[in-house]
Image (tube, rainbow, N blue to C red):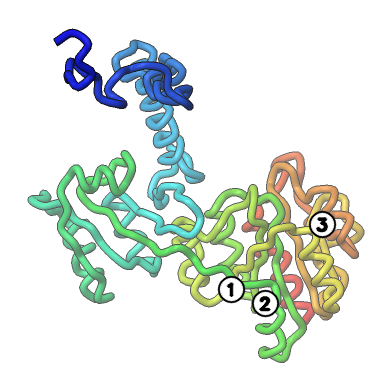
Amino acid sequence: MAGNSQRRGAVRKPGSKKGPQKGTGGHSRKALKGKGPTPKAEERTYHPAYKRKVEAEKKAQEASRREASRGAYGAGARGAVRATRRPRGSDEVIAGRNSLLEALRTGVPITTVYMASRIDHDDRTKAIMELAAQRSLTVLEASRPQLDSLTEGQIHQGVAAKVPAYEYADVDDLLDAADKSGRPALIVALDGVTDPRNLGAVLRSAGAFGAHGVLVPERRAAGVTAAAWKVSAGAAAHVPVARATNLVRALTDLKKAGCFVVGLDGGGDSDVANIAFATDPLVLVVGSEGEGISRLVKDQCDAIASIPINRDAVESLNAGVATSIALFCIAQAR
């Protein structure tokens, strides 16, 4: 009744009323959080710009594969070993029946032979199988798509093979080989020679005339590929090849080790038949057919020798032929 202080009416329980609270500033912070900046058009998979970017990347990859398949061997070199350019330290791939058969015959260090399933055999494939069996090589059957992927678009004719990456020596290894032989050091250094077939010819001449090794730069120079192995006719297995990060520095180190450096170039100090320092520890430097020896390398030479030729008929000799003539003259002097 009225005035009864004991009457319990509708009483709001403590804490049930919504009202000001202490520290309410962060209660709705999550509700205010946005989704971040709008992604670029190229990053939105449904946007036309994204599709254009994907298409451009595919075209760039195809272009790089076509460029790699050309390699350093030339499209018109008949019978030459064709191989893809791959990252340094990785296996090299030989593709094509003629190329693989020649590689097997010339002793290229093949590790694995791949042959397409249901291949139409001919005399070449039969010879490949026989040579692979004689060398106890692993022969694996592969599908056409697998061979396409392995050879990166080359014309493989149903056969391919893997060649392991060549293990290069150090410059000191060439000097050690000379010490063990008991003869004055004889090293051939190549400056700007980019054709692997020229390198193969140099290796063959180096083996024939008793050179202790070949020195090549890391960049803008041919390496020991399947093509070089083929032309060397097995000499690549016996003549070590060293790679120098900087050819000028490597020549400087060889001079400090007691070697004389003689460059082979036109307009030299002497005829190659009377080459200087022939009987001393010697580094013979050979340049490319077109450019010759670079200026910085020529500055390191103690002498320059020339091969007399009929320049009305021939402007210059390639590196393989020039090296062979010079090494013969050195061998005669020794």
Dot label at residue 147: none
Mark 2 residue type: Leu
Residue appearing at x 19%, y 56% in the figure: 115
Say which element carries label 1: loop
Label disc, if present, on residue 240 of the rendered structure? 1
In the picture provided, is 260 more to the left or to the right than 329?
right
Disc 2 element: helix
Quadrant of the rendered image containing residue 330: bottom right
**Is disc 3 surrounded by few (<14), some (14 to 19) or many (20+) residues within 10 Å?**
many
Q: CA distance from mark 3 to mark 2?
A: 25 Å
| 218 on left or right of 14 | right
Name the image quarter holding residue 215.
Answer: bottom right
Q: Position of residue 182 (x, y in %)?
A: 72, 91
Pointers 2 and 1 in contact (C-beta within 8 Å) = yes
| In this view, 228 is above or below 38 | below
Whole-percent x and y of residue 290?
Answer: 70, 42
Left or right of 278 in this view: 193: left
- Report, in whole angstroms, how far the alpha carbon at label 2 lies from the one at label 1: 7 Å
Total label count? 3
Is 297 rendered above or below residue 19? below
Q: Which residue is mark 3?
A: 306
Q: Give the mark nearest the N terminus, 3 or 2.
A: 2
Of the numbered discs 2 and 1, the one sitting upstream in the chain is 2
Disc 1/disc 3 C-alpha distance (Å): 26 Å
Regarding mark 3 in the picture, which secondary structure is present there?
strand
The residue indicated by pointer 2 is 174
Please tell me which of labels 1 and 3 falls first in the chain.
1
